[in-house]
Image: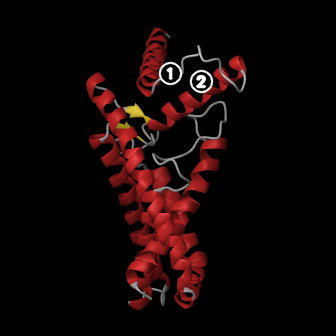
Amino acid sequence: MNIFLTFAYLFFIGSVLGWVLELFFRRFFSRANPERKWINPGFCVGPYLPLYGTGLCVLYALSKAGTDLGFMDLWWKKLILLLLMSVCMTAVEFIFGYIGLKWMHVRYWDYTKQWGNVMGLICPKFSLAWTAVCAIYLYLIHPNVLQALEWLSRNLAFSFFIGLFFGVFIIDAAYSAQVVARIRAFAKKEKVVVAYEQLKTYIKIAEAKLQRKTGFFRPFSEKVKSLPEYMKELIEKEKSRIREDKKD
């Protein structure tokens, strides 16, 4: 099968499944979401996360290369391949996070309170989690991925849906980039870094309170806050919390 179509298919599957995983993680485990709201993860509007799509492509490429080079024959070679996959996934996470932090002034996730973290973007704890994910992929998922790709090669009509996905994804990414650009402009002006997950959680909670206050049909006199207003409120709230922590 065409290599481009292969990686397009993997990117599609990884992005969607990764979005589902992060959706439940943020709902039940994230400290940035104390009220346990359903928060759309990532910067896109739709149900996909490019980080996981890229990650699945990397895992597939490494697993295929390892198989071709005979790394699946001996246990110590498998271990080397597994460690290499873990390092690559950690590197992918760092690159995505670094671009968001340095270029967009947005922090998509925050490991600053984790031991051994680097810029709050990667840490040993989550690298270990990536290792577990890589092991599950290598030993359980990769054979099924090969079967799925074989099925796709016999049913190329399915590629229409992949093309449809990328069409929607590109439009979504362009729109979301405009939103992030507004956040970047505000963050650059205020000389701050915006915690994106915390911002989305704050907006979700604020809108839920407004919904309870005004009902489903809001009065026309009720002014809906703009994105910069939400960011200013969140930053002031964080500054107040920091001042209170210093007093204690």
User: How far across and down, in percent of the image, does residue 32 sit?
Assistant: 55, 34
Please, is residue 55 above or below residue 63 in the view?
A: above
For the residue labelled by badge 1, is the local secondary structure a helix, a strand or a loop? loop
| Residue at image point 46% right, 18% down | 233
Q: Residue furthest front?
A: 220
Identify the mark at residue 61; answer none if there is no mark. none
- Residue 21, image x and y in percent? 60, 55
- Which residue position holds label 2? 206
**Is disc 1 in contact with disc 2, using a CB cutoff of under 8 Å?**
yes
Dot 1 corresponds to which residue? 225
Taking the image as drawn, is residue 82 in sight? Answer: no
The crowd level at tag 1 (other Cα within 10 Å; few <14, some 14-19, many 20+) is few
Residue at image x 51%, y 47%? Answer: 45
Q: Position of residue 70 (x, y in %)?
A: 42, 91
Q: Is residue 104 left or right of residue 166?
A: left
Which residue is nearer to you in this view: 53 or 79? 53
Question: Please, what is the three-letter code of the amino acid marked with disc 2?
Answer: Ala
